[in-house]
Amino acid sequence: MRTADRQALLQQLKLDYSHILINYFTPDAPSPEKIDKFINALFCANIPVPQIIEMHMELIDEFSVQLKLEGLSDDTLLDYRLTLIDILAHLCELYRRSVPK
């Protein structure tokens, strides 16, 4: 995959993940299908786990800055580690199922 294509894909994945993060603890929580679609995209693009964690941390940092600008505490962002754990658990399961028996 060309560098420009890979960068565009990473930007789209980051945008998709930000939507998942924003809505994860709301009544409009992302559907399992939306999370599965995101996981499949990560898997097919062969995105390494450290890069997924980096994407998560970048988004959390951006959210933290925004909350501080609004005069709000960023303590609740710690809860979003659960989102990362959920995503990584789904990805691990996908890898486990992809290994031939």
Image (cartoon, rainbow, N blue to C red):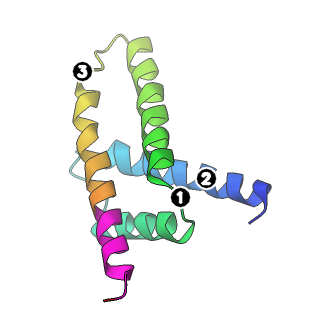
Q: Are marks 1 and 2 in contact (CB under 8 Å)?
A: yes
Q: CA distance from mark 1 to mark 2?
A: 9 Å
Horizontal and vertical percent for residue 87?
33, 56
Amino acid, disc 2: Leu
Work out whether 52 lies above or below 62: below
Q: Nearer the viewer, residue 4 or 24?
A: 4
| Few, some or many residues within 10 Å of mark 1 (<14, 14–19, 20+) | few
Please give the residue where the numbered disc 1 appears in the rendered image. 47
Please give the residue where the numbered disc 3 appears in the rendered image. 75
Q: Earlier in the sequence, mark 1 or mark 3?
A: 1
Q: Earlier in the sequence, mark 1 or mark 2?
A: 2
Q: Is residue 42 magenta?
A: no
- Circle 1 SS class: loop
Q: CA distance from mark 3 to mark 2?
A: 27 Å
Q: Residue at x 37, y 81 (%)?
A: 99
Q: CA distance from mark 1 to mark 3?
A: 29 Å
Part of the protein shown in magenta: 90-100
Q: Are marks 3 and 2 in contact (CB under 8 Å)?
A: no
Q: Is residue 8 visible?
A: yes
Choose mark 3 or mark 2, whichever is in front: 2
Q: Is residue 93 magenta?
A: yes
Choose mark 1 or mark 2, whichever is in front: 1
- Circle 3 SS class: helix
Mark carried by residue 10 = 2
User: Looking at the image, which residue sits at the far top?
Assistant: 71
Q: Residue at x 57, y 66 (%)?
A: 45
